[in-house]
C-alpha cells in the first residue's frame, strides 16, 4: 500500500512525461558461477531488447547496463500494484585474474543474458599462507 502511494506521489511530481521513468531504477537478478572451463554470468532481463543492452569490460570489471521500459507509459493507466521493476539498470562485477577477458561470449535467449568468460591458459599463481613470526 505504501509503495502504491509513493508511486502516486512520484507520478504526480514528475507529471505524465516522467511516467516512463517512475522510479528510474531496475535491479535485475543475476547468477555467477564457474566450472572447469569458464566463468558464467546469467542475468534475467525479460522484456528488454538485446540491442538496448550494453556489455563492456573496463579494466577487470564487467559492466552490464541498459533500460527496461515500462510497457504502459502515457496510456492513461495508473498502477494499482507494481512488482515488476522498470528503468535504467547497471550491474558491475570484478573478473578474477584466472579468467581471460579477451575471450568473452554473450548470448540472449528467452529473457536471460548469458555471458561466458574463458579461463586463462596462463598458470595463475597459487595463494599461499605466510606465517607471521
Image (tube, rainbow, N blue to C red):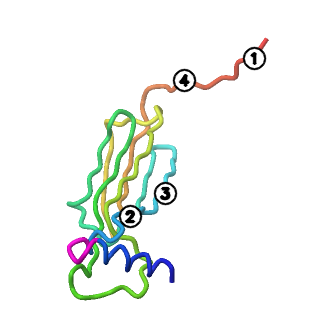
x%, y% of residue 61? Answer: 39, 39
For numbered disc 4, what is the local secondary structure? loop
Q: Is residue 17 above or below residue 106?
A: below
Residue beneath label 2, please?
Answer: 26
Q: Is residue 16 magenta?
A: yes
Camera-nearest label, 3 or 4: 3
How many neighbours does mark 3 have within 10 angstroms: few (below 14), some (14-19), or many (20 or more)?
A: few
Residue beneath label 4, please?
Answer: 125
Q: Is residue 63 magenta?
A: no
What secondary structure prevails in the magenta region?
helix
For numbered disc 2, what is the local secondary structure? loop
Image-quadrant location for residue 51? bottom left
- Which label number is shown at residue 31? 3
- Looking at the image, which is closer to me, 133 or 126? 133
Sooner in the amino-acid sequence: mark 1 or mark 3: 3
Quadrant of the image containing the C terminus: top right
Amino acid at each position: 500500500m505504501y509503495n502504491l502511494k509513493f508511486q502516486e506521489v512520484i507520478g504526480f511530481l514528475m507529471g505524465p512525461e516522467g511516467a516512463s521513468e517512475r522510479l528510474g531504477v531496475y535491479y535485475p537478478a543475476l547468477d555467477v558461477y564457474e566450472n572447469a572451463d569458464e566463468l558464467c554470468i546469467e542475468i534475467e532481463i525479460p522484456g528488454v531488447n538485446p540491442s538496448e543492452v550494453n556489455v563492456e569490460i573496463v579494466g577487470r570489471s564487467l559492466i552490464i547496463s541498459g533500460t527496461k521500459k515500462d510497457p504502459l507509459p502515457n496510456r492513461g493507466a495508473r498502477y494499482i500494484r507494481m512488482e515488476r521493476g522498470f528503468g535504467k539498470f547497471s550491474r558491475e562485477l570484478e573478473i578474477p585474474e584466472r579468467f581471460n577477458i579477451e575471450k568473452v561470449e554473450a548470448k540472449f535467449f528467452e529473457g536471460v543474458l548469458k555471458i561466458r568468460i574463458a579461463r586463462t591458459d596462463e598458470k595463475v599463481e597459487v595463494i599461499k599462507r605466510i606465517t607471521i613470526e
